[in-house]
Image (tube, rainbow, N blue to C red):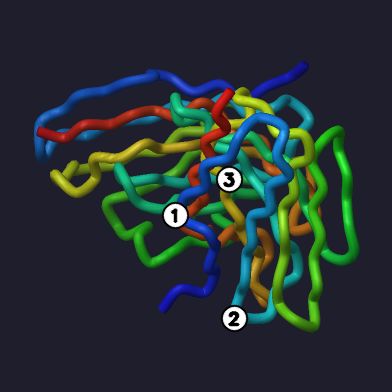
């Protein structure tokens, strides 16, 4: 049973395109994280959301608690954005354990 | 900028051997975590640690695993008797507080059990 589903699994875009990655979850959560995993394996936290919307540079993350859905948007995509983007949630009743999605492999072509 | 560090970056061991993976969390952080990622699979939670004791652990974190904060700066994951299926990337992370705080990840230790 996958508590966190991401789509698409793979995404190829041309430089400059607007990108959306989706995350749906089937359980109650207290927080949702968006993470970026580089080709070498390192993981960087992008956002932590419990409601609404956050923006950092060209990245925007939104969450709809009622619909159990979050999106990560990248504006004016660049080849350096190529990475795996991972959605992870903190389940209600858990203090801080993250439950991860399978990730979206993004490739931005020049 | 402060960062989480992990050593070694790579470790190869024989099945049945004990391994200790080391992490130095960010200095003012209070919560520490271990995660693992088997090649090609999603990241999985192993354990969280606060105030010198385990806060939460997953089903994966069985009796062959243990964690310790031996000296106030290091945070270690010990696997007592490694199995082939323990081969994975192990990530340490830390956060200032708990649920609503960003977790900062180390670069990982790639463990290969032969």
Image quadrant holding the N terminus of chain A, namely: bottom left
Residue in view at x 68 percent, y 53 percent: A20
Q: For the residues tagged 2 and 1, is the chain the same?
A: no
Task: Tell which tag, 1 or 3, sits nearer the viewer.
Answer: 3
Residue B44's label in the rendered image is 1
Q: Residues within 10 Å of mark 3 (few under 14, many from 20)?
A: many
Residue, disc 2:
A26
Q: Which chain contains the residue that carries disc 1?
A: B
Residue B13 relative to residue B54: left or right: left
Q: For numbered disc 1, what is the local secondary structure? A: strand
Residue B102 relative to residue A91: left or right: right
Do labels 2 and 3 touch, CB within 8 Å? no
Q: Is residue A36 above or below residue A86?
A: above
Q: Residue B33: horizontal and vertical position, in percent?
A: 56, 45
Residue, disc 3:
A85
Task: Tell which tag, 2 or 3, sits nearer the viewer.
Answer: 3
Q: Earlier in the sequence, mark 2 or mark 3?
A: 2
Q: Residue B80: horizontal and vertical position, in percent?
A: 24, 42
């Amino acid at each position: 049973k996958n508590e966190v589903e991401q789509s698409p699994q793979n995404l190829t875009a041309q430089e400059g395109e607007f990108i959306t990655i989706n995350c749906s979850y089937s359980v109650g959560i207290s927080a949702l994280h968006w993470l970026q995993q580089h080709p070498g394996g390192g993981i960087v936290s992008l956002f932590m959301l419990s409601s609404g919307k956050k923006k950092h540079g060209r990245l925007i993350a939104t969450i709809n608690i009622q619909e159990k859905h979050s999106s990560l948007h990248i504006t004016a995509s660049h080849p350096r954005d190529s990475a795996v983007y991972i959605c992870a949630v903190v389940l209600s009743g858990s203090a801080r354990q993250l439950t991860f999605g399978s990730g979206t492999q993004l490739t931005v072509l020049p | 900028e402060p960062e989480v560090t992990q050593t070694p970056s790579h470790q190869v061991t024989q099945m049945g051997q004990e391994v200790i993976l080391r992490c130095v969390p960010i200095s003012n952080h209070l919560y520490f975590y271990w995660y693992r990622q088997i090649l090609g699979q999603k990241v999985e939670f192993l354990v969280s640690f606060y105030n010198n004791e385990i806060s939460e652990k997953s089903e994966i974190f069985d009796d062959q695993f243990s964690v310790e904060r031996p000296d106030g700066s290091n945070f270690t994951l010990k696997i007592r008797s490694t199995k082939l299926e323990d081969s994975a990337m192990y990530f340490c992370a830390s956060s200032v507080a708990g649920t609503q705080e960003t977790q900062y990840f180390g670069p990982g230790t790639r463990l290969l059990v032969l």
